[in-house]
Image (cartoon, coloured by chain):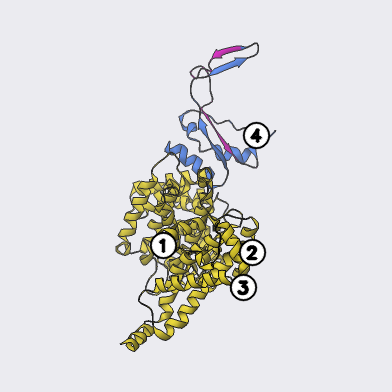
Chain colours: A blue, B yellow
Amino acid sequence: MKKWMDWIGGIAAQNKLTDRGNRLGQEGKVLKPGNMITDGPYMELKEALGGYTLIKANSFEEAAELSKNCPILSVGGSVEVREIIAM
Amino acid sequence: MYFAKASLHKSMSTHTLIPHLFRTEYQKITAVLCRLFGIEHIEIAEDIASDAFLQAAETWGLHGMPENPAAWLYTVAKNKAKNYFRHDAVFREKIARQLSHTLQDAGEIEIDLSPANIRDSQLQMMFAVCHPAIPAEAQVGLALRILCGFGLDEIANAFLVNKETINKRLTRAREKLRGAKIKIELPPPEAIHSRLETVSTTIYLLFNEGYYSLAQDTVLRKDLCLEAMRLAYLLVENEQTSTPEINALLSLMCFHASRFEARIDTNGDAVLYDDQDSKLWNKELIEKGEHFLNNASKGNIVSKFHLEACIAYWHTQKNDTGKKWESILQLYNQLLIIEYSPIAALNRTYALSKVHGKQTAIEAAEKLGLGTNHLYHALLGNLYTGIDHKKAIGHLQTALAMAKSAADKKIILKQIEACR
């Protein structure tokens, strides 16, 4: 928790944090066309989203740079950086 | 005996006695009269109060101070108000209508200067003055004038502008309040929380003016801090306004104020925290801070005032323990997540250096984008000391060039000297 707070705090200190986000629970539901609802996604079988955070950056490179200290990386996880396209 | 008393009072100087009395009683009288007359006539209320003090200055200078100066002032203010009613029929009718009185004699309007009414009026005036309808700067100025009884010269001094500028600012603020037809009353329960945000911001700004301002007069600045605390205390004393946030605000002010005596040395120069004699820290204020922090620890909301109060609490513990700085680092993390500010970012970086070392802090600092802030350079000067002499001096000199207050320049110069 401390490591995560330090990482988010570092981004906040640069005034680049939009929303600290949240962790995501392990259970869930998956909806598919044709009204199919199944349990899942299963974390042990594939990579699943562990959490999300919203930041401000001028480029993907900058966003990736900010993600470098995410604690998930030190336990074998990865960080996906995506741009929010405002509607 | 009377003559001796008069000259004794004169030598005690009515000059120093009246100003403090002025502040304390002026804001009480003004609050009661303002609430009575309404926002459209606050200037009349202020004038009546000022006149009472003018009369005091003249009379007491000649005959010495009365046994009960406050009572004397109240009597004179009441009489002046009643005279005003008597001579201005339009005004009288307006007020009478507001109070739903049918007036035959102007003397029927009773001006209640009891402690209870004074307190209620002050509370209500606080919400009227700290109103989102006027800019924050104007709120602080008006608060200083009406809520705290400061003179225009003193306010001008605090803001480092001239008297005319302050006068204009206050006049414009009063006009805006009149235009918005602000009612002098406690906001309804649904609105109190959001209105308290405006009030607490003004109190916070007021405290900050005193704690770290460019003004040179250290006595004045201490008074600003004490006034901010007094206003917060008024809120804490009333059940409806004694929210966790307000208690946290009062707590943080108590903690910071506890170091007043230690912050200035005998030459009037600022003393940095690490160099302060902690024996000069005011234990009573620290205890009060803890008391209000406990009060604030209710409910689910952790506001920025809570976080700042916790940080301020840690600073009352002088020992440089690991726990102290780790706690402070986490608190700054939380604070920045709630609301970014350059100062919080810089302070966090200092805490980072204490927990994870100077190198980590230097890397983090250089990402902050605060190169135009003299405190940024002062911090880097501090961080580079012992690591890179040239860079340390470079940053300190940049800080010196950018610094605005004489006190800041002196401290930075000392650090440059210590580096050589």
Picture coordinates of residue B329 (x, y %)? 43, 47
Left or right for B307, reference B276: right
Q: In the picture shown, does residue B226 fall above or below A62?
A: below
Answer few, some or many: residues within 10 Å of disc 1's Cα (few below 14, many 20 plus, some between 14 and 19).
few
SS label for mark 4: loop
- Which marked residue is nearer to the observer: mark 1 or mark 4? 1
**Label annotation for residue A84:** 4
Instruction: Say which amino acid is labelled 4.
Output: Ile
Which residue bears the numbered disc 1?
Answer: B114
Q: Chain of mark 4?
A: A
Asked whether residue B44 is drawn in magenta, I would say no
Which residue bears the numbered disc 3?
Answer: B164
Instruction: Say which amino acid is labelled 1.
Output: Ser
Q: In the picture shown, does residue B294 fall above or below B36?
A: above
Same subunit, tags 4 and 3: no
Same subunit, tags 2 and 4: no
Asked whether residue A50 is drawn in magenta, I would say yes
SS label for mark 1: loop
Of pointers 1 and 2, the one earlier in the residue sequence:
1
Residue B138 visible in the picture: no
For the residues labelled 4 and 3, the Cα–Cα distance comes to 50 Å
Question: What predominant SS class does the magenta segment belong to?
Answer: loop
